[in-house]
Amino acid sequence: MKRTVVWFVVCLTIVLVACSPLEQNARNTAAALQGAITSAQAQYQTECTASPKDSPCVIINKAVEAQNALVTAVEAYCGWSEIAPPANGTATCVPVKSAASGLQAAINNATLFISEVKGVLK
């Protein structure tokens, strides 16, 4: 989980310097999803530790998976890889046009989970 958060922050930071609307949309969606997940995890930590198969817990876990998929889609779109990540937080995204539809699908999926996670917050 810690590695995922680090990758998320690195990717989000890198995408912050991006110019295209698709990259901007990915950044905004990632930030909104992260906020929703953080709130839900804080609210349901005790319940999910005791009963991880409860509906809110399943939704939270699936939202984390959607967040990971979004990060992977950003990496693919920008031509980065987990094996050879950008050397610093100011690397420029060079869009790989063939990955645009995958990034858009990941954004759409993450957007759905933002709504689902918000729906379980009390």
Image (tube, rainbow, N blue to C red):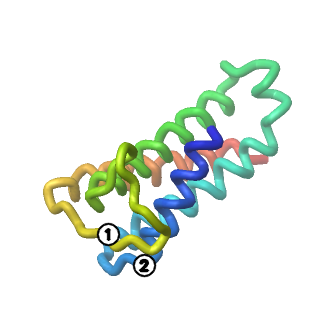
Q: Residue at x 65, y 53 (%)?
A: 36
Q: Secondary structure at mark 1?
A: loop
Tag 2: Cα neighbours inside 10 Å, few (<14), some, or many (≥20)? some
Sooner in the amino-acid sequence: mark 2 or mark 1? 2
Q: Is residue 87 left or right of residue 73?
A: right
Looking at the image, residue 1 lies above or below residue 84: above
Does dot 2 land on a helix, a strand or a loop?
Answer: loop
Locate the N terminus by quadrant: top right
The amino acid on which the numbered mark 1 sits, given as a three-letter code, is Cys
C-alpha distance separating marks 2 and 1: 8 Å
Q: Is residue 21 above or below residue 6?
A: below
**Amino acid type of the residue tagged 2 in the rendering:** Val
Observer-nearest of 79 and 48: 79
Q: Nearer the viewer, residue 35 or 4?
A: 4
| Residue 59 spot, x, y in % from top left | 59, 34
- Report the residue at 35% width, 50% height from top: 84
- Report if the CB atoms under discs 2 and 1 are less than 8 Å apart: yes
Disc 1 marks which residue?
Answer: 93
Q: Which mark is residue 17?
A: 2
Task: From the viewer's side, name the closer residue of 23 and 84.
Answer: 84
Image coordinates of residue 122 in percent, x first then y, are 79, 47
